[in-house]
Amino acid sequence: RDRNGVSHIDALLVECEGADWIVFEQLDLKRYRPGMIKIEVGALPAPEIGQVVVKLKTAGYQVSFQAEDVWAFA
C-alpha cells in the first residue's frame, strides 16, 4: 500500500494534453502493475512515445497502437 492506501490498479488512463510522459514515467509498474493501460500519445514528440513503449515492453506488457493512443495489457 502507498500513503493513500492504494494497493492495486485495475485500469489506468493517462491523458494529460502533452504531459503524458511526465506523468507516466513516475508510475512504478512493478509495484502497481495495472492490468490495462491507455496513454494518449498524439501530442507527444516521437522520442517520448518511444520511451512509453520501451517502459511498457520492459515491464512485460503487450503494446498496441490505436489512433493517437497506446494500449497495453499485462
Image (spheres, grey):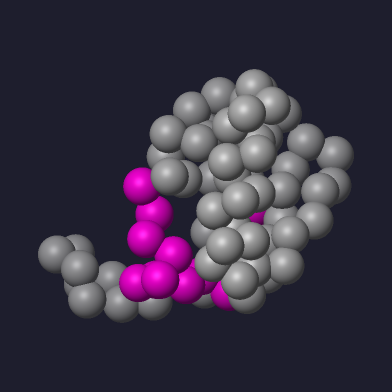
For the N terminus, which image quadrant?
bottom left
Give coordinates of residue 68: x percent, y percent.
Answer: 78, 36
What stretch of residues is rendered in magenta? 26-38
| Residue 73 visible, this angle | yes
Would you place residue 70 above or below residue 45 in this image?
A: below
Give coordinates of residue 57: x percent, y percent.
Answer: 64, 61
* Membership of 25 in magenta stretch: no
Residue at the image point whose x is 50% and y is 36% from the top: 21
Residue sitting at the far right: 67
Picture quadrant where residue 6 is located: bottom left
Residue at the image point whose x is 59% and y is 45% from the top: 52
Q: In screen coordinates, is 3 left or right of 7?
A: left
Camera-nearest residue between 73 and 13? 73
Q: In screen coordinates, is 66 left or right of 37?
A: right
Would you place residue 3 above or below residue 54 in this image?
A: below
Give coordinates of residue 5: x percent, y percent.
Answer: 21, 72
Number of marks: 0
| Residue 11 visible, this angle | no
Would you place residue 38 above or below residue 10 in this image?
A: above
Give coordinates of residue 72: x percent, y percent.
Answer: 68, 62
Picture quadrant where residue 37 is located: bottom right
Would you place residue 66 above or below residue 15 in this image?
A: below
Residue sitting at the far left: 3
Residue at the image point whose x is 57% and y is 62% from the top: 58
For the C terminus, which image quadrant?
bottom right
